[in-house]
Image (cartoon, rainbow, N blue to C red):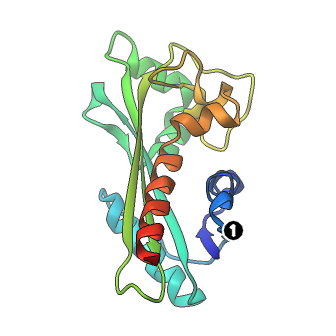
Amino acid sequence: MNLHYFTTNKSKIEEANNNLRNYGITVKQVNLPIFEIKSNNMHEIVREKVKQAFAVLKAPILADDVGVFFDAYNNFPGDSPKKIFQGIGYSGIMRLLKNKKRTAKFVITLGYLDKQLKEPIFFTGTCFGRLAEKPCTRKNSNFPFDSIFIPRGSKKTMIELNVEERKKFSCRTKALKKLITYMRNYEK
């Protein structure tokens, strides 16, 4: 089976293929000129992405929205982490967290739509952890919060983990496992 993943991020495609290839699913990247709505509701954002992409492709499609939620700031920055990072960078984030609770979580809402469904279905994944005292700058990431987020059960930031370690903690992997379960039950 071929699945299309609406994203500009090749790392998402690699992670999806690493999780789904053993189930006979190949994930292909799709980048379409789609309007992304502004909302504080990740389900609404993903619903619109998936529906717009499916209307063009008429093929099974995935899309997602990822948020980072700091416990010290009532779940800020939420579903706008890249925008916040672009505005204040690591130095601003570190100033915000000075003498504050550093627990946080990554949350993904993954949407799926195919021709059998009338509306997208959603799978969520959560990775709990804490924010480092300073960013790991030894490696680059498409997602800057990977350099400061330490998953619960690890001593390393997400960026420092190898592929198998990341898979163990990844919110995307958790959501993709739920998708696999759904597909297995759907086929019966």
Q: Position of residue 49 (x, y in %)?
A: 47, 73
Residue furthest left as drawn: 74
What residue is rendered at 62% in x and 53% in y?
19
**What SS does tag 1 mark?**
strand
Q: Position of residue 120 (x, y in %)?
A: 38, 76
- Quarter of the C terminus within the rendering: bottom left
Query: Please, what is the three-letter code of the amino acid marked with disc 1?
Result: Thr
Which residue is rendered at x = 70% and y = 31% of the image?
Answer: 162
Q: Nearer the viewer, residue 118 or 49?
A: 118
Badge 1 density bin: few <14, some 14–19, many ≥20, Cα 10 Å: some
Picture coordinates of residue 104 (x, y %)? 37, 29
Q: Quadrant of the N terminus?
A: bottom right
Is 87 situated above or below 118? above
Write the residue at 29% across / 28% down.
71
In the image, what residue occupies the spot 69% across and 68% down? 26
Residue 161 at x, y percent in the picture: 66, 28
Q: Residue 13 occupies which quadrant of the picture?
A: bottom right
| Count of residue discs | 1
On screen, residue 131 versus residue 69, left or right, reads: right
Which residue, as the protein is rendered here, is positioned at the far top?
99
Please say if 24 is above or below 171: below
Relative to the observer, which residue lies in front, 188 or 19? 188
Taking the view exactly as shown, the residue that stands out farthest to the front is 188
Q: Nearer the viewer, residue 94 or 16?
A: 16
Q: Is residue 76 above or below residue 12?
A: above
Residue under numbered circle 1: 26
Name the foreground residue: 159 vs 124. Answer: 124
